[in-house]
Image: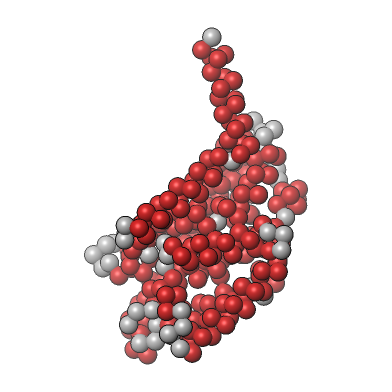
Amino acid sequence: MEQSSGTPVISKFRQFVNHDLTILWAIVFIAWVLTILAAATGQEHWLHQSALIKLERIPLLLKLLLFLAAWQVMTAAMMLPSSLPMVRLFVKVSRQQTKPQLALLAFLGAYAAVWTGFAIIALLFDIGLHSVVQHWHWLHHRPWIIAGSTLVLAGGFQFSSLKEQCLNSCRHPLSFLTHHYQRGLKAAWNLGIRHGLYCLGCCWALMLVMLAVGVGHFTWMIVLTVIMTLERTWKQGRELVPIVGITFLVWGGLVLLNPVWLPDLLGGYGGH
């Protein structure tokens, strides 16, 4: 009797989770709550890679682990909302598999792995960049050059063919799954990698801006999340792409000309 009474409850719970993606929305919510709490309590420096880099007593491996923990929170908060249409369709088409929950876990794990790999490369590059700034007298006294150049790079990338190709894949999840979906855990992992790479190709330059201002910067997390979500899910999202590109190009140019423009955007490279 216990087994028979318990099975319908478990089945209904799984259907509820699969249909509404409640768990994923909960993850997004928790990620934003953690970010808000960090900002409200003045502990956001633990999410900031520049602050971690400057902590000389902490070993590099520990810095990397702390940064990746902060990065996972940021990725959940910023990237999951724009990926939910893809995840929702994947849940629907994978229900006929023998282990749909594991397939979803493999898909999401692969997606997270792509962004984690990008984070590791970005952090190591940032550490090297900090070292260059410290030893290059001219650049050390002009830190806004890095922030302005990052904005110009992000703005220019908005007009690239790679951005267009990757954005097209992200904006049409049904077409993506029709061409690439296969059954099995390995196939789900490969699909998550493919989707993650398209997502990375679409948004890497915008995430570089996030790194420039510092992981965990609450205001810019909101701004960039809105931009990436609208670009990938809004009907008029394509029209937003050149607007963002022009805006970043202009802002970057202003920062390069005079650092008094948008000083908060300078992040870890804005101080003297």
Front-most of residues 87 and 116: 87
Residue 260 occupies which quadrant of the picture?
A: bottom left
- Residue 169, can we see it? no
Does residue 3 appear left or right of residue 130 in this picture? right
Visible in this render: residue 96?
yes
Q: Is residue 179 above or below residue 200?
A: above
In the shown orientation, is residue 18 left or right of residue 262? right
Q: Nearer the viewer, residue 115 or 240?
A: 240
Quadrant the N terminus occupies: top right
**Which residue is rendered at x = 69% and y = 33% of the image?**
96
For the image, the number of numbered tags is 0
Nearer to the camera, 148 or 95 = 148
Say which residue appears at 31% left-offset and 57% top-offset. 41
Q: Is residue 226 left or right of residue 96?
A: left
Check the picture and name the quadrant holding the C terminus: bottom left
Residue 16 drawn at (x, y percent): 60, 32
Q: Residue furthest left?
A: 57
In the displayed structure, does residue 54 sit left or right of residue 204? left
The percent position of residue 113, horizontal first and vertical second, equals 52, 53
Q: Indicate the colouring scheme.
A: secondary structure
Measuring 56% from the left and 47% from the top, which residue is drawn there? 108
> Can you give x and y, in whole percent of width and height, for residue 150 in the image?
51, 77
